[in-house]
Amino acid sequence: MIKLAASKLTDRTTLRRAATSLAAAALGLAALAGPAQAAPLPLFPFLPLPMLQQPMPPAPQPQLAPQDDENAAISNELPARLRRQVVSYTTREAQGTIVIDTANTYLYLVLGNGRAMRYGIGVGRDGFTWSGVQPITRKAEWPNWTPPAEMIARQPYLPRFMAGGPGNPLGARAMYLGGSIYRIHGTNAPATIGTRVSSGCIRLTNADVADLYARVNVGTKVVVLPIERRADAIDRSRG
């Protein structure tokens, strides 16, 4: 009986050892196969998982500036003589000077060598024209409009202030003349170019005033001729 018991004990020990060996082998196989089946570790384990799974936002796209195609089209609808153009122009004024030919509703930017850039303009109505020499003292894009006291006295219904923008009567650009109340500015009423309707300011289409604005600086000399006098020039359009 003692031998039989010893034999059974030996068989149990052998079975336990066999089971242990099989378990170890299974763990080894799992370890070898595990890396191929396991999910990859996150690149930044210190960040919360939802943040890692969120897609990156798209890069911001640059905003394009508004185009002047519409204003250019309006300028092309003007009569040929009022469209912006380079003309022959003889004058004693220095290159870079602006000459306002009030009588003929032209603005000349002297280019030198007997040439000038000519723009069609609107000028002061009867009783509101003026003449003289003033420098450009300030430039503004889409300027605000504060009607001067003299204008409000004549037209008390006018707003006391209007923010700059497409609906502002000063249009896209303004160049202020000395310490006067007058300006060279744009207009949202291009049909008034070539007419005498303003309170003394010189107006151009928005496309033309933007072009002139880019060509001149603060300090530019502006000569405004009286309405009775034509510009001292030989003005012949190119061609």
Image: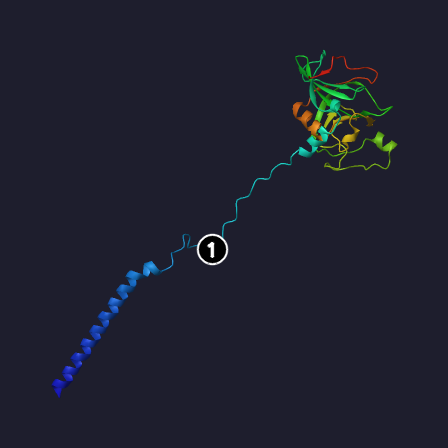
In this view, the residue in front, 122 or 157, is 122
Residue that appears at 28% across and 61% down: 32
In this view, the residue in front, 114 or 170, is 114
Q: Secondary structure at mark 1?
A: helix
Residue located farthest toward the bottom when viewing the structure as drawn: 1
Judge from the rendering whether residue 33 lies leftward or rightward of residue 140; answer left or right. Answer: left
In this rendering, the answer to whether 176 lies above or below 163 is: above
Which quadrant of the structure image shows residue 138? top right
* Three-letter residue code for mark 1: Gln
Residue that appears at 69% across and 21% down: 85
Mark 1 Cα shell of 10 Å, populated few (<14), some (14-19), many (≥20)? few
Any part of residue 118 in sight: yes
Residue located farthest toward the front when viewing the structure as drawn: 239
Expressed as whole percent of the image width and height from the top left, the position of residue 148 reads: 81, 31
Colour scheme of the rendered structure:
rainbow
Which quadrant of the structure image shows residue 45? bottom left
Expressed as whole percent of the image width and height from the top left, the position of residue 63 reads: 60, 39
Expressed as whole percent of the image width and height from the top left, the position of residue 133 reads: 76, 18
Any part of residue 177 in sight: no
Question: Which residue lies under the disc numbered 1?
Answer: 53
The N terminus lies in which quarter of the figure? bottom left
In this view, the residue in front, 209 or 4, is 209
Expressed as whole percent of the image width and height from the top left, the position of residue 208 reads: 70, 27
Judge from the rendering whether residue 39 lies leftward or rightward of residue 197; answer left or right. Answer: left
Which quadrant of the structure image shows residue 65? top right
Judge from the rendering whether residue 210 lies leftward or rightward of residue 132; answer left or right. Answer: left
In this view, the residue in front, 134 or 202, is 202
